[in-house]
Amino acid sequence: MLDKSPNQRSVNVPNDLAAFWMPFTANRAFKKAPRLLAGAKDMHYITTDGRHVLDAAAGMWCSNAGHGRKEIAAAISKQAEALDYAPPFQFGIPQAFELASRIAELAPKGLEQVFFCNSGSEAADTALKIALAYHQINGQGGRCRLIGRERGYHGVGFGGTSVGGIVGNRKMFGTLLTGVDHLQSTYNRDKQAFSKGEPEWGADLADELERLVNLHGANTIAAVIVEPMAGSTGVIPAPKGYLKRLREITQKHGILLIFDEVITGFGRLGFAFAAERYGVLPDMITFAKGVTNGAAPMGGVIVRDTIYEAFMAGPEHVIELCHGYTYSAHPLACAAGLATLDIYRDEKLFERANKLEPKFADAVMSLRNEPNVVDIRTVGLTAGIELSPNKEGPGKRGFEALQSGFHDNDIMVRVAGDTIALTPPLIISEAQVGEVIEKVAKIIRAVA
């Protein structure tokens, strides 16, 4: 037993697991059977005991260019030696302006301004605050209601949690923000099961927004925020035509439309942003994760130029938007972002993902007859394999699949309830797709 006296604190003991309260983790179960990582290269993590674990999750949807990219590490190191930190309030660094320009070039035309933060959660809250402020300065301060969607995920800030629609993420935190409502989820297994890409059924679900407009009044609604593909809830692609219909309704009523592309941005669906895939121009796009390949924390919001210009009408010496973070546009994150965008461009990874999508979908669909598989959903280089709950209740089979993958089959997967999510780095080879499917089949049989 460890000595808990003041002179022998457990936190000083190598590999002691007690002090770290892990996020979004079953802490007691983890500490009984830890999943510890010590390194990573290309498509694999390396465990503390030297095993190579195939990464079928791109870390957490973020390492789109694979792991251990020397170009990114070198850029971070060089930047740290030259300028380790600079205040983003009232001062700037060249790299921040360069990165913003390059991100804006990748975004749909009309989305011209980039506001930096440090995570997807901060990006969601930033976008919601910009929406509220925009209506306020336009003399429509009554537009303060925000609308999310059931099963949506927009991070863990108070704003993002409020508009989010995953019950487990909300129920511990009381009423959260007031004046929030939710569209219904776009998922219906009876009508959409085993869909490749965007389901044929479901576009009319966007008309639910008209009901909420009639209920609350259009002049009370500031913004609607949705994910083009709801990832954290288990991979739910938008139905064909759904996002375009949502855009039509929001424009009709003067409501801002925000696409949360923290997961779908930077190639996950075969394009720089899903907005391009679906031919829809939202008012804002949130991003994070893939912008730095996960090598440094960074997020942001890409904003329509008309929204930005509305803030630029007052005296020039006055701060236009009282919002930001100490580490917005951090020098090391900017260096990582620029190096990451170089890799995406030079290796044509967005185009590569687009080309590989049909083969990836076919491969994943080959699992449909495995035990307890009730649905498979694919879009881009992303798939959700939904398993039926076991007798111990929802989520237990999924948790066992996570453990089986890491400890017994040398593969990292994401799980959402009883859904196994596959979101591999965009560098994955066709042979490695086959390896992923083989290992996932073993997992499904092991937890049957």
Image (spheres, rainbow, N blue to C red):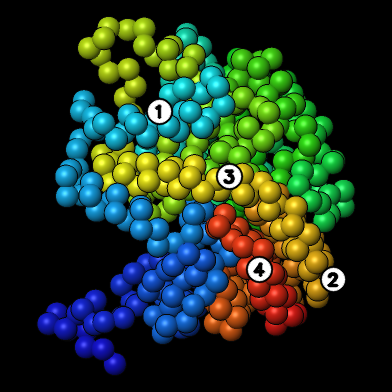
The residue labelled by disc 4 is: 431
Q: Tell whether label 1 touches label 3 (CB within 8 Å).
A: no
Q: How far apart are marks 4 and 1 (CA)?
A: 37 Å
The residue labelled by disc 3 is: 350
Q: Tell whether label 4 touches label 2 (CB within 8 Å).
A: no
Left or right: 193 as drawn, with respect to 175: right
Q: How far apart are marks 2 and 4 (CA)?
A: 22 Å
Q: Residue furthest bottom?
A: 1
Question: In this orientation, does residue 411 appear?
Answer: yes
Type of amino acid under label 1 = Ser
Location of residue 158 by image quarter: top left
Q: How far apart are marks 2 and 3 (CA)?
A: 31 Å
Q: Is mark 3 on a helix, strand or loop?
A: helix
Q: What element carries label 4?
A: helix
Give the number of the mark in front: 2 or 1: 1
Which of the pair 63/244 is nearer the observer?
63
Give the number of the mark in front: 2 or 3: 3
Residue at point 52%, 66% (across, down) = 43
Q: Distance between the residues labelled 3 and 1?
A: 19 Å
Where is residue 414 shown, x and y percent of the image? 58, 64
- Position of 303 relative to 315 (above/below): below
The residue labelled by disc 1 is: 101
Q: What element carries label 2?
A: loop
Type of amino acid under label 4 = Ala
The residue labelled by disc 2 is: 369
Quadrant (top left/top right/bottom left/bottom right) for the C terminus: bottom right
